[in-house]
Image (spheres, rainbow, N blue to C red):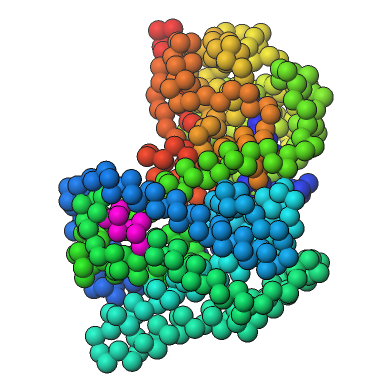
Amino acid sequence: MTPNPGEERAAGADSQQGGGTGRASPRRWWLLPLKLALAAAITWLILRGAGLTLAEAWAEVDWSVVRLNVPFLVLSAALLLVAFVIPAALWSRVLAAFGETPVPVLQATAMLLVANLGRYVPGKVVQVAGLAVLARRAGMSGVRATGAAIVAQILNLIGAAILGGWVAYQMNDSTGVTGLAVGLGVVLAPVAFLYFGGAEVLLRWTLKRVGHSGELPRAAGRRLLLLVPGYILNWIVYGGVFASLAAGLGLPIPFLFATTAFAAAYFAGYISFLPAGIGVREGSLIFLLTPLVGPGPGVVLAALQRVWVTAVELAAAAAGAWLLRGSGSAGEEPVPERIGKSYYDQSAYFADGTHMQDFDSRFQRYRVGKVLELHTPGPANRVLDLGCGWGTISFALGPGVREVVGLDFSERAVAGCSARLGRLRLDNVSFVCADARATRLPPASFDSIVAADLFEHLYPEDSEAVAREAFRVLRPGGRIAVWTPCRTHILEVLKNNNVVLKRDVSHVDYKSMPRMKQLLGDAGFEIERAYFAESHVPGLVVAERLLQRWVPLLRRRIAVLAVKPEAA
């Protein structure tokens, strides 16, 4: 078995929607490397402005200066929750200006927290698309909801500019005229854009291109500017978050400085159009903090504020997903009491697997690459692909090994794989319809076994039987590679609550890392490697690599490689 087709579309901007092939656009493959290079270049320039290189700043880092003060950390977390509520209440007010019924504050907060996860995807597209989906599920116009969100973001940037735009003026050592001009320019540009109707023109032009211009009623930019004080208040609260965090780490900074510095860094990160402003926000904070606390503590504060804000935001988003669970899920397919062979053969699960077999899609490149990173069978190996599903792993392994046998108990899956096999002309690949709990294959007949996206489809007792059967058919010294989703990841939380992403009812039993290792150990295997792997979503993957050690919501996949002892 392989992932639900909906998982491939989680990257949003990088996959075609609904019934497409899922092929990544050839015109955009260069976009992510370009943006990462841009982030590095901008960060380098910012640090050079402070007379530092990243290496020099990092050399000054001394983590021993951190002295935890729990009450201040609790205060910081509490203020951060307040900072999530204020923009939600303001967005509800903007919605009213666009002709929608205001949303209750708790519901609006949950919607924005979930949609804001799209910030980790380049281009801000998924953030807006996610909000549109949630709005439609709540009975609102997705066009009006996203239009209101875009205008709300402009208002938010105006608030950040008013507080943070003056940093250039405050730090200017000359007459201050240049700094004053820059500060005024940063503040007045978005104000003028909204006041003179620029946001409305841009929105209507965009909506006209997709045939929805009639859904957006006229909203007066001048009246919306009255909400700016609310966004300024929100940035003051964020200043309290940052100042409390600094005090909680034993590196106190003045409240006023924390407010202006955090707003300025956010503004710089946002206009860079990089995922969540990663790199640029941290570089800006280091630049601003260095004269006050020194380069080492500046790096510590800049890095830990990202960890802190991301961790609290993800936890709040998970709570938001729980609050929104099941909303708008009418029409979901009925779930059988027990998911078994008949479900996969008779439901729509394998009805159209062509896009899942597209090796060029971002998701499949990621999936195959990560499985091979966990374990690459040798050219003389005979490999068993347990729960082969659409056969993606089998076809990917075929050219590099002696033989691949793909096994699945779904007749529809095996028929689809066999049909594709006839077109690919891989003589060393074959598919058999059999139960992974009792394959009836000869003992010790395979050198390697791959179980990619299988164990989440198995009930506990079936998982134990499959692990024992894998041990039986594997030769001594052979290896089994297990690749399965981690239930705690934010994407799984969203899916399991039917929020933005559709629940995969075939995922009947997620395994934790300890449980997966125990299953294999009880079957007789020795664990060789076990780790959490990141997702395929651009932007989010950066946060996952940096923070998954501490933040369970960023642990996308469980990867375990085990060996059958030679003496077995």
As drawn, 291 above or below 494? below
Q: Residue at x 30, y 55 (%)?
A: 244
Pinpoint residue 351: horizontal percent, then vertical percent: 80, 34
Q: Main secondary structure of the magenta part?
A: helix
Q: Residue at x 70, y 67 (%)?
A: 98
Q: Is residue 268 left or right of residue 391?
A: left
Does the magenta portion include 169? no
User: How many numbered discs, if any?
Assistant: 0
Q: Nearer the viewer, residue 295 or 234?
A: 234
User: Would residue 293 be visible to someone looking at this image?
Assistant: yes
Q: Nearer the viewer, residue 98 or 480?
A: 98
Q: Is residue 457 left or right of residue 34?
A: right
User: Would residue 372 be visible to someone looking at this image?
Assistant: no
Pinpoint residue 418: horizontal percent, then vertical percent: 77, 28
Q: Nearer the viewer, residue 87 or 160?
A: 87
Which image quarter holds the N terminus? top right
As drawn, 496 above or below 202? above
Does the magenta portion include 245? yes
As drawn, 81 above or below 478? below
Query: Residue 345 falls in which quadrant of the image?
Result: top right
Q: Residue at x 35, y 89 (%)?
A: 178
Query: Residue 140 falls in which quadrant of the image?
Result: bottom right
Q: Which residues are magenta?
A: 239-246
Which image quarter holds the C terminus? top left
Pinpoint residue 328: horizontal percent, then vertical percent: 73, 42
Pinpoint residue 555: horizontal percent, then vertical percent: 47, 38
Q: Residue at x 59, y 62 (%)?
A: 91
